[in-house]
Image (cartoon, rainbow, N blue to C red):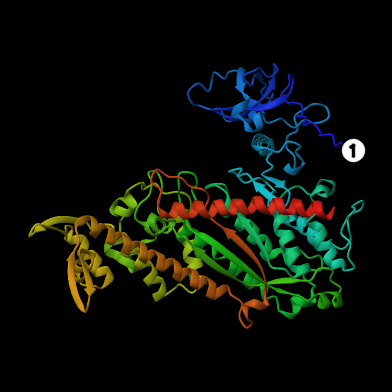
Amino acid sequence: EEEEEEEEDHEPPSRMVAGATVYVRDPHYSWIPATIETEEDDKKRVKVSVRLPGNWKEQTVEATGRGAKNMKMERLVKLTDYGNDELPLQNLEKDGVTAMGKNDMADLTNLHEAAILYNLKARHAESLPYTRVGDILVAVNPFRWIDGLYAREKQEFYAENLIWSTVAAPKGRRSSVKTNNPLATAATEKKALGYDYEKLGINPHVYETSSLAYLGLAMERSDQTILVTGESGAGKTETIKIVMNHLATVEKSRPQWPKSDREKEIGGGSDTTVNRVLQATPIFEAFGNAKTLRNDNSSRFGKFTQLQFDIESIAEAREAGRAVPSCHLAGSKCITYLLEKSRVVSMSEGERTFHIFYQMLGMSDDEKRDIWEEGLMGAGTSDFSYLSKTSSDAIDGLASPENWPETREALSVFGIHGDKFMNVMRSLCVILQLGNITFDVETIDGEERAMLSARDELDKLSSLMGVSAAEIEAALTKRIMSTRGEEFTIFVNDSGARDGRDALAKEIYARIFDLLVAACNESTEPKGAPTNQYGTISLLDIFGFESFKVNKFEQLCINYCNERLQQKYVLDNFEAIKSEYEDE
């Protein structure tokens, strides 16, 4: 009878040894590089020496908090304060130098928060805003335009290498994908090409994402979606604009352009469609964006844009001698949600409401006279309560008067002109004037009732709306309740009246915004064929994570949505790696 010997469990040797290069937490810089000087003691502590890189001062914003200038270079660190009782290790090259600036962070041996941050920091210092993590692209906002980064030549480079040259594999490239369909081979292989990109000279770029989305649509006839998420001010809105511009015009980078037989058949009409899709941007920015503490042009609504493409069949492409079927932009559809209506009536200190209100004050006198002479002529932000809470008359950026002509032209393109234009602008004026309506309290039979105190402001509002002052006053200070066939008049107090006034202003703005979205969709959606006959590339642009002094329901929805999206990113990455291992 054989006896089974139980294997003894052996703990792996500790990596926290003298000389190990690690990162330690720092109250001012989050993480700083260090070297372990002593072995772990009986209290699970190690002594470390901070080792700042030689370019620290050039590449680091100096902290200003208490004690920041007197950094402790020798520290006693408790390992129990870190995950797995270990300090995160630095990534070293063969020569012992810390690995920095990797194109793909999946190549980092030790992948943790500190390594990710220092890798991104090194690339940021070299004006390289894009970095890969497998199939996910990480973008760090450089807060400046980098010369040539979005040039036409750059767009054509990524389209040529990732779309048009798909059938002929790059020299020296080996693929584990086996299929008899060369079109499917190209589309599938590109998604697993990360390790070959550097050999091909293809650095991480947002055009890589848009090119692969176009390729998947054309070759596999599979609808694509690009999710853009991140904290407020990270550059999500600009990224969406860059991607949309590339997707809308990528067909023009085809080597045969403009000799394509298919383009001749549609008579060059795609140019009008492309321009129409891109011209909606000024409207969404004026009516949906605002200045926040972290971003001068923050999107205050979520936007799901669906670009609809007329895809050529594989048979037609082969007959015409095209390796990649053509995908012509036929139109687009936009779905918006979570518009931050509360910004119309209240903002945090140092922030502003939507750009359109400030642009409106910068209109020409003739325009003001046509829209609302009594209230707009000579008026500034201080003349309207909703604008004077946090803003000054010195308005810059997209809210400046210089941007109004572009907004008006875009409105006209989408059919907002004539009487419709006047109705939209006067509705905005109604919102501003509602903010000037104030209330006092009167006590009748022991009950506090709201009464309007600024009669002249009420008269202005009455004239603007074409509704009698008595009707407006009754609507703002009374509520009609119906029960069992009877109606009762309830008088509200001053607080309830203000809430009702603000609710009306927010609802008017929401309806204006919905009207504009509908106008844009009506103008850009393809005509003549059902929507489900088109292939789509969808782009999701959502708010970033937010935390204000006063957080409202919008912030709860925004942050919950971001948490779920962040979870999706993580799970998708794990699934991609799992699938890769299974294939191998």
Quadrant including the N terminus: top right
Residue hosting label 1: 2
Q: Is residue 298 visible to the viewer in this orientation of the structure?
A: no
* Residue in the foreground of this view, choosing between 311 and 134: 134
- Horizontal placement of 93 versus 508: left or right? right
- Horizontal placement of 293 versus 306: left or right? left
Q: Which residue is painted at 58% across and 65% down in the image?
A: 305
Looking at the picture, how far across and down is residue 153, in whole percent? 75, 55
Looking at the picture, how far across and down is residue 488, in whole percent? 18, 72
Q: Which residue is painted at 71% across and 38% down in the image?
A: 111
Q: Which residue is painted at 53% across and 23% down in the image?
A: 68
Q: Tell me the SS state at disc 1.
A: loop
* Residue in the foreground of this view, choosing between 543 and 463: 543
Looking at the picture, how far across and down is residue 95, in whole percent? 83, 27
Q: Amino acid at mark 1?
A: Glu
Task: Please say if 67 is above or below 370.
Answer: above
Task: Please say if 311 is above or below 98.
Answer: below
Residue placed furthest toward the bottom: 528
* Residue in the foreground of this view, choosing between 297 and 198: 198
